[in-house]
Image: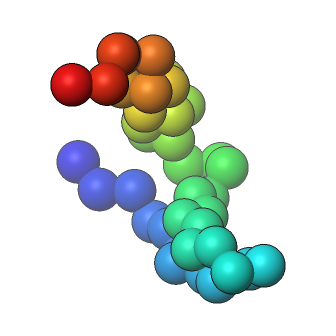
């Protein structure tokens, strides 16, 4: 599975921009939000 994205630098942060119309983008964003909800080790 691959999702087209661009790595950009904005306001001293590194940002990963995804193509919104790609079919797997919503699946990836759901998985990332699940990972962020986990407690820190």
Q: Relative to residue 32, is residue 25 drawn left or right? A: right
**Residue at (58, 58) in percent of width and height:** 18
**Residue at (23, 48) in percent of width and height:** 1
**Residue at (29, 56) in percent of width and height:** 2
Q: Is residue 27 above or below residue 1?
A: above
- Tell me residue 22's x, y (percent): 54, 48
Does residue 37 appear in this view? yes
Q: How is the image coloured?
A: rainbow
In terms of depth relative to the viewer, which is nearer, 41 or 34? 41
Q: Quadrant of residue 32?
A: top left
- Tell me residue 33's x, y (percent): 50, 25
Residue sticking out furthest to the front: 41
Does residue 34 appear in this view? no
- Tell me residue 9's x, y (percent): 64, 83
Q: Is residue 24 above or below residue 21?
A: above
Q: Is residue 1 above or below residue 38?
A: below
Residue sticking out furthest to the right: 11
Count of picture labels: 0
**Residue at (51, 41) in percent of width and height:** 25
Q: Is residue 39 above or below residue 25?
A: above
Q: Which quadrant of the rendered structure holds the C terminus?
A: top left
- Tell me residue 24's x, y (percent): 44, 38
């Amino acid at each position: 599975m691959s999702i087209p994205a661009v790595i950009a630098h904005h306001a001293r942060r590194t940002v990963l921009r995804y193509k919104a119309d790609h079919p797997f983008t919503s699946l990836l964003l759901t998985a990332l939000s699940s990972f962020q909800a986990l407690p820190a080790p």
